[in-house]
Image: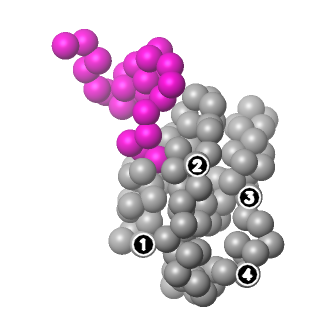
Amino acid sequence: MELTLKDRVLILNNVLPMYDSRKNIGLKISVTDKIKLSDTEQKDIVTTPVGNGEFEVSFKTVDAMTGIKSFDFTDDELMYLKQRVDFIDRNGMFSAETIESYTKILDEPFVSADKQAEWNKAQGMDTEQ
């Protein structure tokens, strides 16, 4: 999955919860380890609180704003991210600041057709055509 620095900041700060089940915390730790920010990246971002626990992300350099890195998530990690974003969506917590990043997660395909079918079924999508 290709993620910008902004995508990663939003996942780390908004998508991944502080508390969850033991299995899900294991997935959270795995995802966090993969996308954690380097010291240089942390210095390139500015987060400004905008209320309701949300913040605006801005960047000190153009490269930080436009740079993309590729991350290989397992299907279980991707399912966890999709479930978290779906929860955010069902609770009306998307914003203009987050919609692009959150939609990117929801649109990312699974490697396994079985996992994709499981996701589609959970979403009420007809997988048989």
Q: Which residue lies at the image location 72% right of the left edge and 48% below the top edge? A: 34
For label 2, the residue is 70
Q: Which residue lies at the image location 69% right of the left edge and 54% below the top edge? A: 35
Is the residue 109 above or below the residue 58 in the image?
A: above
**Crowding near pointer 4: few (<14 within 10 Å), some, many (20+)?**
few
Q: Mark 4 or mark 2, which is nearer the start of the sequence?
A: 4
Q: Mark 2 or mark 1, which is nearer the start of the sequence?
A: 2
What amino acid does circle 3 point to? Lys
- Residue sitting at the far left: 129
Q: Secondary structure at mark 3?
A: loop
**Crowding near pointer 1: few (<14 within 10 Å), some, many (20+)?**
some
Name the spot of residue 95 as percent of width and height, x first.
39, 69
What amino acid does circle 2 point to? Ser
Quadrant of the drawing holding the C terminus = top left
Which residues fall within the magenta stretch?
A: 105-129
Q: Which one is in front in this view, the residue at disc 1 or the one at disc 2?
A: 2
Spatial CA distance of label 1 from label 4 is 20 Å
Spatial CA distance of label 4 from label 3 is 13 Å
Classify residue 2 as left or right of residue 99.
right
For label 3, the residue is 36
Q: Mark 2 or mark 3, which is nearer the start of the sequence?
A: 3
